[in-house]
Image (spheres, rainbow, N blue to C red):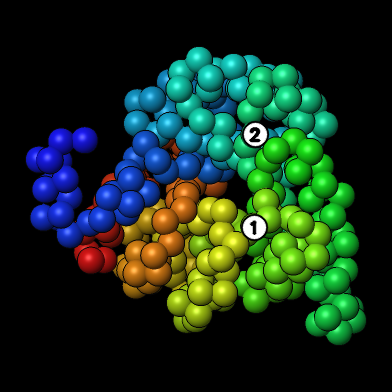
């Protein structure tokens, strides 16, 4: 790295870690497969990502995508795209991870028990996820508990489950994947929620944030709370992976990702 480049970073007021964390080639594209209105093939998807400068993908899928699992992995490897994470579980995918020697994070919706004391619920959530904890350990993959509403979507509960898994089950590979678009009820206490989760965070996926989730999916920079929340994130010293998402079936994925990239760049300028 040149001394001139380091000087430019220092003058900009952005640390090297933050510059890398939010740079386009470090961001993770999320919800870009079944939500793609253009229904791209793996090869076309890689072409789109390369045009945008994105080099990491969290892979979501539906039944019709299963026959493409291996081709997706091959295309990513061939074109320098990181297969960063895989949604939920599938035995064929697990076999292919071994075959192609990749270890993506596995993202799984955190379990939400519906009865019992808080202690009972935490223990039930721990026991429910243990088989996947062991499977991901065997695969050499991190396991991310994904907030998707309900009891299992609350930061305090996610952190409590992770703490027990770390302390009691030697499961330091388990952590939290926190999604802004499933966290609208945390807007007002985001700083506190982030602090609870931070020791366990595997990834944070950004989204434009309006009160009342109106609308739920919004490009970064178009929400009323975006500057404040990203400023909190930058000030937290969280230096882990950051994701942006499509999640809009009525919009070309390329357009949705472009809007997020543009909005994030603008927000980072304002959220100093």
In the rendered view, would you say 197 is above or below 189? above
Read off the residue under disc 2. 103
Q: Residue at horizontal 64%, vertical 57%? A: 175
Q: Position of residue 206 (x, y in %)?
A: 46, 56
Instruction: Tell me if 56 is positioned left or right of 25 in this view.
Output: right
Left or right of 151, for residue 192: left
Left or right side of 131 for 27: left
Question: Looking at this view, is 197 or 114 the one in front?
Answer: 197
Quarter of the image where one finds residue 23? top left
Dot 1: within a 10 Å radius of its alpha carbon, few (fewer than 14), some, or many (20 or more) residues? many
Residue at 63 percent of width and 37 percent of height = 104
Question: Which residue corresponds to mark 1?
Answer: 175
Q: Which mark sits nearer the N-terminus, 2 or 1?
A: 2
Depth check, front residue: 89 or 209 = 89
Asked whether residue 68 is in view, the answer is no
State yes or no: discs 2 and 1 in contact (Cβ < 8 Å): no
CA distance separating discs 2 and 1: 15 Å
């Amino acid at each position: 790295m040149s001394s001139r480049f380091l000087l430019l970073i220092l003058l900009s007021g952005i640390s090297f870690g933050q510059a890398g964390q939010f740079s386009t080639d470090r961001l993770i594209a999320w919800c870009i497969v079944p939500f793609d209105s253009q229904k791209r093939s793996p090869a076309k998807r890689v072409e789109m990502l390369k045009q945008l400068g994105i080099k990491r993908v969290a892979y979501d899928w539906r039944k019709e995508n299963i026959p493409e699992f291996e081709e997706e992995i091959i295309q990513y490897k061939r074109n320098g795209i990181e297969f960063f994470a895989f949604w939920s579980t599938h035995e064929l995918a697990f076999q292919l991870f071994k075959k192609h020697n990749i270890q993506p994070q596995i993202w799984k919706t955190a379990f939400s028990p519906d009865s019992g004391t808080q202690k009972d619920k935490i223990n039930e959530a721990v026991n429910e996820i243990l088989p996947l904890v062991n499977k991901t350990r065997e695969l050499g993959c991190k396991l991310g508990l994904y907030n998707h509403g309900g009891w299992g979507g609350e930061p305090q509960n996610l952190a409590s489950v992770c703490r027990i898994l770390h302390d009691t089950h030697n499961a330091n590979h388990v952590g939290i994947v926190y999604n802004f678009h499933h966290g609208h009820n945390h807007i007002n206490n985001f700083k506190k929620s982030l602090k609870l989760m931070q020791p366990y965070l595997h990834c944070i996926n950004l989204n434009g944030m309006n009160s009342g989730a109106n609308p739920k999916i919004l490009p970064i920079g178009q929400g009323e709370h975006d500057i404040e929340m990203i400023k909190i994130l930058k000030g937290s010293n969280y230096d882990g992976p950051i994701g942006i998402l499509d999640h809009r079936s009525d919009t070309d994925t390329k357009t949705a990702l472009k809007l997020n990239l543009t909005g994030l760049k603008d927000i980072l300028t304002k959220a100093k």
